[in-house]
Image (cartoon, grey):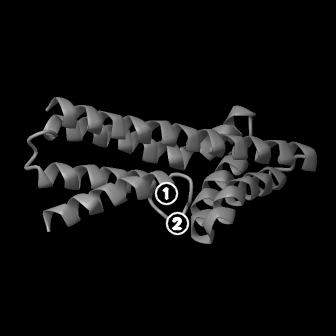
Amino acid sequence: MEIALYVLAALLIVGGLVGNILPALPGIPMIFGGIWLAAALDDYRHLGLWWLVIIGTLGTIGVIVDFVSATLGAKRVGASKLALSGAALGTVVGMFFGLAGLLLGPFIGALLGELLSGTSVLRSAHVGAATWIGLLLGTLVKLVLSFMMIGLFAFAWLVG
C-alpha cells in the first residue's frame, strides 16, 4: 500500500506540472498535495514543517499570480477600470470553459470592458492583447515556481 501511495504522490506532482498548462487540472495545488503526501508517508523525516511552509508559500504565490496576471497585463498598458474588471471577470468565467475559455476569457473581458469605457476598437484590442500577454507570462511564472517547489522537495529529500 505504501508503494501505491508513493506512486500516487508522484502522479500528483507530474499531473500538477501538466495542470499548470492545461486548465482542467489545478496544477500547483496538485504538486503541493503530492509533496505533502510523500512527506507524510515518510513521517516527515526528510521534509519537515519548515520545508512544507516554504514550498507552500511558493505555491500560494503561484496561485495568486495565476489569478492576477491577466489583470496586471491590462493595467500595464493603462487600461480603464472597466477593462481591469472585465479581465478579472473574464479570467474567472473562462475557467469554466476549458483551455479556450482561459485563453480567450481575459482577452474578451478586457476588450469588452475597454469598449464599454468608450475607447476605440483598436485601443480596446490593444488592451485585450496586453491582457493575454500577461496571462502567458503568469503561466511562465507558475511553471518556474512549480519547478522551484519540486526542486526544494528533491533537495530536502536528498539532504534530510
Question: What is the C-alpha distance between the residues marked 2 and 1?
Answer: 7 Å
Q: Residue at x 20, y 33 (%)?
A: 158
- If the image is split into quadrants, where does the C terminus sit? top left
Dot label at residue 24: 2
Q: Residue at x 58, y 70 (%)?
A: 96
In the picture provided, is 2 more to the left or to the right than 114?
left
Instruction: Check if mark 2's residue and mark 1's residue have beta carbons within 8 Å.
Output: yes
Q: Residue at x 86, y 50 (%)?
A: 118
Which quadrant would residue 41 be assigned to in this image? bottom left
State whether residue 54 is above or below residue 88: above
Residue type at mark 1 is: Gly
Residue to which mark 1 is pinned? 19
Residue type at mark 2 is: Ala
Which quadrant would residue 113 be assigned to in this image? bottom right
Indicate which disc, 2 or 1, sits on the residue closer to the N terminus: 1
Which class describes the residues within 10 Å of circle 2: few (<14), some (14-19), or many (20+)? some
